[in-house]
């Protein structure tokens, strides 16, 4: 395992330990918020040990509803279905979760068949997980309130987000998969930050958390700079 996976694996053990500790405290549903290209999807899929990884990207609206939204931005997610997935998992420890294939519909993407997931803990990961502070995110609040805890991966700067996303697309291109042109990547990252300004949507998650919240700072190679830190005091 070399390159991106090797660098991201440095954050895997702290993430595994964090999930184990939260599960020991009785948590069933956790969230992980991290910028594009930070390796959150790869990391969450490697945890194992009864931890079910669900990407909020798999909960995009199916076509043709998705055509009414900019994929990845507030409003593009099927929140009723996501609420159902979380509620089913909390109650039964299992859930049917859709998958989203970004290569379908001429690159617009579409939902494909459901997958059965069963485990001790569900980790919902995504760029906007937990984000609040603007009107377009108000509909997401009932989803975030279902979570027992939130982990925020923090890049060294927002310039690194674009760099990481470009690196991720380059890896995908080398492997023979479809990849975005660098100009398209830059436009995507710019749209994300315009839709969810960090000072409004992400900084308050640590300064005024509304649920148990932790953070993990990453260096320019996506390696942890320190251990996972709690944003609030726990009794």
Image (tube, rainbow, N blue to C red):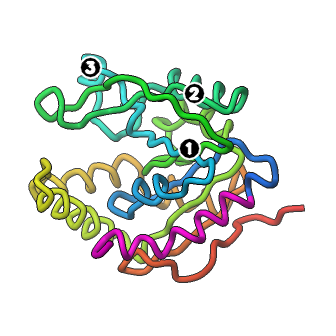
Which range is magenta? 1-21
Q: Closest to the observer: 73 or 100?
A: 100
First in residue order: circle 1 vs circle 2: 1
- Residue 124, x across and y down, in percent: 54, 44
Whether label 1 touches label 3, CB < 8 Å: no
Q: Closest to the observer: 212 or 89?
A: 89
- Residue 72, x across and y down, in percent: 34, 41
Q: Main secondary structure of the magenta part?
A: helix
Q: What residue appears at the point 80 percent right and 47 percent down from the top-left corner? A: 26
Measure how far apart labels 3 and 2 are at the Cα level. 22 Å
Residue under pointer 3: 63
Q: Secondary structure at mark 3?
A: loop
- Among the 4 quarters of the image, the one containing residue 78: top left
Residue 222 highlighted magenta (yes or no): no
Residue under pointer 1: 52
Residue under pointer 2: 95
- Residue 180, x across and y down, in percent: 13, 51
Q: Residue furthest top?
A: 64
10 Å neighbourhood of mark 1: few (<14), some, or many (≥20)? many
First in residue order: circle 3 vs circle 2: 3
Q: Secondary structure at mark 2?
A: strand
Relative placement, left or right, of 203 versus 114 is right
Q: What residue appears at the point 64 percent right and 25 percent down from the top-left corner? A: 88
Q: What residue appears at the point 63 percent right and 40 percent down from the top-left corner? A: 119
Measure how far apart labels 1 and 3 are at the Cα level. 26 Å
Whether label 1 touches label 2, CB < 8 Å: yes
Q: Secondary structure at mark 1?
A: strand
């Amino acid at each position: 395992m070399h390159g991106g996976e090797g660098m991201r694996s440095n954050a895997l053990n702290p993430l595994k330990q964090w999930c184990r500790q939260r599960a020991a405290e009785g948590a069933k549903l956790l969230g992980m918020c991290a910028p594009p290209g930070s390796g959150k999807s790869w990391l969450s899929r490697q945890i194992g040990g009864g931890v079910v990884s669900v990407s909020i990207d798999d909960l995009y609206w199916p076509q043709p509803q998705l055509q009414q939204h900019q994929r990845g931005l507030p409003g593009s997610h099927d929140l009723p279905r996501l609420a159902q997935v979380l509620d089913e998992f909390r109650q039964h420890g299992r859930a049917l979760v859709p998958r989203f294939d970004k290569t379908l519909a001429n690159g617009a993407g579409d939902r494909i068949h459901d997958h059965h997931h069963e485990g001790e803990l569900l980790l919902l990961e995504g760029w906007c997980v937990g984000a609040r502070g603007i009107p377009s995110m108000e509909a997401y609040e009932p989803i975030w309130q279902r979570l027992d805890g939130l982990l925020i991966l923090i890049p060294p700067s927002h310039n690194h987000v674009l760099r990481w996303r470009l690196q991720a697309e380059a890896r995908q291109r080398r492997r023979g998969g479809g990849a975005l042109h660098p100009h398209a990547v830059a436009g995507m990252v710019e749209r994300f930050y315009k839709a969810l300004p960090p000072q409004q949507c992400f900084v308050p998650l640590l300064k005024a958390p509304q649920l148990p919240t932790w953070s993990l700072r990453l260096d320019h190679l996506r390696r942890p700079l320190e251990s996972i830190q709690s944003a609030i005091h726990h009794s």
